[in-house]
Image: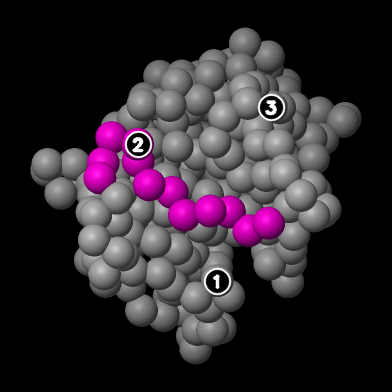
Amino acid sequence: MQVRAYRWFRTAGGRVAIALTLLVPVGCSAPAPRPFVPSDLPAGDPSASRRAAIAPAEPEGPRVETVEVAPGVRVVVEWPAVADQDTTGMIDALRDYRAGSFKAVVTGGQDTAYLKTVQDVASSDAYRWVREFLEQRRSVRGTSRLYALNVVSVTGRGAQLNGCIDETGMRLLDSETGKAVRRQPGWTRKPFLQVAGLRRGDDGVWRIKVLRHAELPSEAAKGCLR
């Protein structure tokens, strides 16, 4: 059955579909996300591709990293048990993007370091996300957790990284009063799957080109329940 794909980006109040483009399908019967290959790169020799298991084994004593974004705001990363240099670079990019975007929000847009972690479509989406928070006078407080991080495929300089994000420990605030808004958005109530399409630059740094989301009850996101 053909499933219609939408590109989603997170807003202060939730997530909205903005275009009929290549994205993670959302829906009860949606298949798992397809591997991402940047359109400006050759597919390359199939033997060069590296695919990880869809459901990686539970690591024994994973390394947990906490990034203090601001007082009362943090990003916690549960690292996989084994991560090579490229995997580390990809996770670094996703971590720095998420921590940086929150930093931009809590500083009223003064900190723009998050824009160094994204390019192309992801850059414009990330900027819109921060801008909407500021225009609606919203901020955040709490903990965002990244876990089940998994490199699905690598082809040449392109790669796809899947990861689960749990922001049930976060609250959307009125930036003027510092108090939680009465109607909290859906992303504060349940975890979701984030898919990042990345590209390694000539400087060896991985940057995010495309960001996708799959939300429950999508089959793709059910692996984020725990």
Q: Residue furthest left?
A: 203
From the viewer's perspective, is residue 88 above or below residue 114?
A: below
Q: Secondary structure at mark 2?
A: loop
Examine the residues drawn in magenta and state their main secondary structure: loop
Q: CA distance from mark 1 to mark 3?
A: 26 Å
Residue 183 percent across, percent down from the top left: 87, 31
The answer to whether the residue labelled 1 contacts the one labelled 3, judged by CB atoms less than 8 Å apart, is no
Of badges 2 and 1, nearer the viewer stands 2
Front residue of 11 and 33: 33
Q: Which numbered marker is on residue 95?
A: none
Looking at the rendering, in which quadrant would you find the C terminus? bottom right
Q: CA distance from mark 2 to mark 3?
A: 22 Å
Q: Is residue 188 visible?
A: no
Q: Tell whether position 33 is magenta.
A: yes
Residue drawn at point x = 26 percent, y = 69 percent: 47
Residue drawn at point x = 50 percent, y = 75 percent: 53
Q: Residue furthest top?
A: 135
Query: What is the magenta range?
Result: 31-42
Q: Which amino acid type corresponds to the residue marked 2 in the rendered image?
A: Ser
Q: CA distance from mark 2 to mark 1?
A: 23 Å
Front residue of 127 and 142: 127
Left or right? Give the position of 101 relative to 154. right
Residue 37 percent across, percent down from the top left: 38, 47
- Specify which label sits upstream in the sequence, 2 or 1: 2
Q: Which amino acid type corresponds to the residue marked 3 in the rendered image?
A: Ala
- Quickly name the residue at label 1: 54
